[in-house]
Image (cartoon, rainbow, N blue to C red):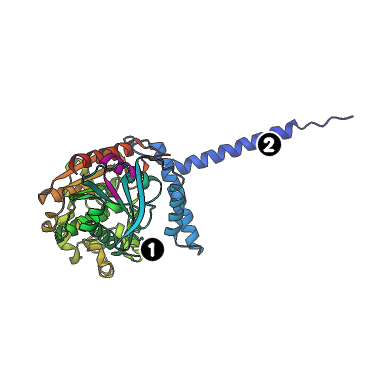
């Protein structure tokens, strides 16, 4: 009886499998790999984070194009589901959800409270381009618990409404109203908080909101308490110049690219998303745009930045621009949206600041210029710069990512609050 030999076919199948695996590996590596500066913290880990975020964004764009929902809501769904996987196991802190002047908030307090002792407090605003974020889940929840524990403080995280459901100035107004409510004598007494030892804090778009709220409360100065300090982590503070030295330097660095920042601005301000290209060329603030003239010196980065940050980059200032942009979107120059554009008289009333910046971040110069302008106005400023930092690193200080620069950044700003609050 003849024997059947299957070895050649099995060998061919194995070669086919190996070939397919090799091609798939190359394709994945090609998609994930992007050249990054050697000075950036844990580059391969950041490549994976960047590739994941790009994938989610691309899928969301495709789903929106075929009518399955707004891409921001789809991204938020993915972010919320990821954050819900991060375990929150933090002893010694209790929390409860409530509302401050109809704005949802979560309040964190140490479980052990010293009797007859007034506590410090931090009001926190989360980042995410005024449109993305899960402040009560995962990394932000852990961050607020860590602040409450290490500072023995009351920490309030504000769950402000976001785009595309609402547009500017709603996010700003939600944050302002929540802080004003918290600073009322009855609420401060309820939480045993010293009215003169309250800080506002935020990262990225949350840093924008913290700076804007601090400015308004400083100008108003009519509350029983006040804001003693502001902590701004890689804040976004202006939409006039999308070609500062840091924008040009970090054109292709995850996770915040120039086109993405411009897109967030247009979402926040309720403007036509097709304006992205014009914004990236600075056509809205070209030399012939007289509405921008009063603000140009406020973000003259050739004057406000140290030489080592300017490097060899040059300003991008077209001679002729698009006059319709500032007419259609006047909020681009509204100081409530762009705190860097505030007058010096307003900056003088702002509280002392801790401003964190990262070398590998398009927003590096926003924070640096704001710190310099506050100093010129006589405000005490601590500028903490991370040469290996990148945008969003504070959110990656916890499991499952544990970026070393994120852990250092969190530890440093909490230590500053311990000393100054």
Look at the image and tell me in which quarter the C terminus lies: top left
Is 381 on the left or on the right of 282, as rendered?
left
Point 38% across, 37% down: residue: 402
Mark 2 to mark 1 CA distance (whole Å): 51 Å
Q: In the structure shown, which secondary structural element does the residue marked by tag 2 occupy? A: helix
User: What residue range appears in magenta?
Assistant: 145-155
Q: In the structure shown, which secondary structural element does the residue marked by tag 1 occupy? A: loop
How crowded is the residue under tag 1: few (<14 C-alpha within 10 Å), some, or many (20+)? some
Point 19% across, 42% down: residue: 383
The residue furthest front is: 115
Classified by dominant secondary structure, the portion drawn in magenta counts as: helix
Is 205 on the left or on the right of 32, as rendered?
left
Is 330 on the left or on the right of 15, as rendered?
left
Question: Is 3 inside the magenta-drawn segment?
Answer: no
Look at the image and tell me in which quarter the N terminus lies: top right
The residue furthest right is: 1
Location of mark 2 (residue)? 13
Nearer to us in this view, 65 or 342: 342
Q: Position of residue 356 (x, y in %)?
A: 24, 44
Location of mark 1 (residue)? 164
Q: Where is residue 149 in the image (x, y as percent from the top left)?
A: 30, 41
**Vertical placement of residue 237 versus 67, above or below:** above
Point 35% across, 46% down: residue: 94
Q: Position of residue 353 (x, y in %)?
A: 18, 47
Nearer to us in this view, 312 or 393: 393
**Image quarter for residue 48?**
top left
């Amino acid at each position: 009886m003849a024997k059947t030999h299957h070895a050649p076919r099995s060998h061919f199948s194995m070669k086919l499998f190996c070939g397919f695996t090799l091609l798939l590996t190359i394709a994945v590596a090609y998609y994930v790999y992007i050249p990054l500066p050697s000075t950036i913290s844990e580059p391969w880990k950041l490549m994976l984070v960047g590739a994941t975020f790009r994938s989610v964004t691309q899928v969301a764009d495709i789903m929106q194009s075929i009518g399955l929902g707004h891409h921001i809501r789809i991204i938020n769904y993915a972010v919320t589901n990821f954050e819900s996987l991060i375990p929150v196991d933090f002893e010694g802190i209790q929390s409860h959800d409530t509302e401050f002047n109809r704005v949802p908030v979560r309040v964190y307090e140490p479980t052990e409270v010293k009797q007859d002792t007034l506590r410090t407090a931090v009001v926190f605003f989360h980042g995410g381009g005024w449109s993305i974020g899960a402040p009560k889940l995962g990394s932000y929840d852990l961050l607020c618990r860590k602040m409450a524990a290490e500072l023995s403080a009351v920490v309030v995280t504000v769950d402000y409404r976001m785009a595309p459901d609402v547009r500017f100035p709603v996010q700003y107004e939600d944050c302002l109203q929540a802080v004003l409510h918290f600073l009322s004598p009855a609420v401060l007494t309820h939480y045993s908080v010293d009215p003169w030892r309250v800080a506002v804090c935020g990262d990225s778009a949350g840093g924008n909101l913290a700076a804007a709220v601090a400015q308004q409360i400083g100008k108003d100065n009519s509350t029983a308490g006040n804001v003693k300090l502001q902590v701004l982590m890689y804040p976004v503070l202006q939409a006039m110049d999308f070609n500062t030295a840091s924008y040009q330097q970090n054109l292709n660095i995850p996770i915040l690219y120039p086109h993405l920042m411009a897109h967030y601005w247009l979402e926040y301000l309720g403007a036509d998303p097709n304006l992205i290209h014009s914004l990236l060329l600075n056509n809205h603030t070209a030399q012939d745009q007289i509405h921008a003239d009063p603000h140009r010196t406020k973000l003259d980065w050739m004057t406000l930045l140290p030489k080592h940050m300017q490097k060899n980059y040059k300003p991008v200032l077209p001679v002729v621009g698009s006059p319709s942009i500032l007419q259609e979107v006047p909020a681009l120059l509204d100081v409530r949206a762009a705190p860097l554009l505030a007058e010096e008289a307003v900056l003088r009333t702002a509280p002392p600041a801790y401003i964190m910046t990262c070398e590998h971040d398009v927003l590096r110069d926003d924070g640096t210029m704001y710190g310099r302008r506050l100093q010129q106005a006589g405000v005490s400023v601590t500028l903490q710069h991370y040469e290996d930092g990148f945008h969003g690193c504070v959110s990656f200080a916890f499991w499952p990512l544990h970026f070393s620069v994120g852990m250092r950044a969190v530890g440093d700003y909490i230590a500053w609050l311990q000393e100054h609050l």
